[in-house]
Image: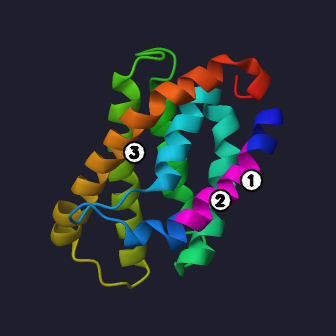
């Protein structure tokens, strides 16, 4: 429960930064997704069960702030948690390879699911262009950022006094 109280203010900051600042920052056509990065790291640090509620809470907050139809981000963020939790303990444990792979895969899956949902809602979504020019580069950038952030997060996770373990 303490991890949830720690994550709620962090979730508000992450959603606000993602919706207001991060879409202005880019490396070519790649844009970092702090929500996906934080959920991947949170899932790896606390486990799937503790990451589901923050994902459910962050999704409508982001939808509201970003101007998306309410609820569009719920399924993609739950998929992010699912992907990150698949190998959290069994495949790689705390090794660096799994978080990088999970961030890349989760970014692609979340983006593709969001595109599908928006298409089903009648939005124009040029799949090939968006996947090749934005989703893949953004997934690579998210994986690189997880690489940079993972070691400090693992250090904090190992310190139970922070409520992350």
Question: The C terminus appears in which quarter of the rendering?
Answer: top right
Do tag 3 and tag 1 residues touch (Cβ < 8 Å)?
A: no
Q: Which residue is mark 3?
A: 106
User: Badge 1 is on which residue?
Assistant: 9
Question: Which stretch did the figure color magenta?
Answer: 7-17
First of labels 3, 2 by sequence position: 2
Question: What is the x, y in percent for residue 51?
Answer: 64, 40
The residues bearing labels 2 and 1 have C-alpha atoms spaced at a distance of 6 Å
Mark 3: which secondary structure?
helix
Question: SS for tag 2?
Answer: helix
**Residue 149 at what x, y percent from top left?**
46, 36
Name the secondary structure under disc 1: helix
The dot on residue 13 is 2
Q: Nearer the N terminus, badge 3 or badge 1?
A: 1
Disc 2 vs disc 1: Cβ atoms closer than 8 Å? yes
Image quarter where the N terminus lies is top right
């Amino acid at each position: 429960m303490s991890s949830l109280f720690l994550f709620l203010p962090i979730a508000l900051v992450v959603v606000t930064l993602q919706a207001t600042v991060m879409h202005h920052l880019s490396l070519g056509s790649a844009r970092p997704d702090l929500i996906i990065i934080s959920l991947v790291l949170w899932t790896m640090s606390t486990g799937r069960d503790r990451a589901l509620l923050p994902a459910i809470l962050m999704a409508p907050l982001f939808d509201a702030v970003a101007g998306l139809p309410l609820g569009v981000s719920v399924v993609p963020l739950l998929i992010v948690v699912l992907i990150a939790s698949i190998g959290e303990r069994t495949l790689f444990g705390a090794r660096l390879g799994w978080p990088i792979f999970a961030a890349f895969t989760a970014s692609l899956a979340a983006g593709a699911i969001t595109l599908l949902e928006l298409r089903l809602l009648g939005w124009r979504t040029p799949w090939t262009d968006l996947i090749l020019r934005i989703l893949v580069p953004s997934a690579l950038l998210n994986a690189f950022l997880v690489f940079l952030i993972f070691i400090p997060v693992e250090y904090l996770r190992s310190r139970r006094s922070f409520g992350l373990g």
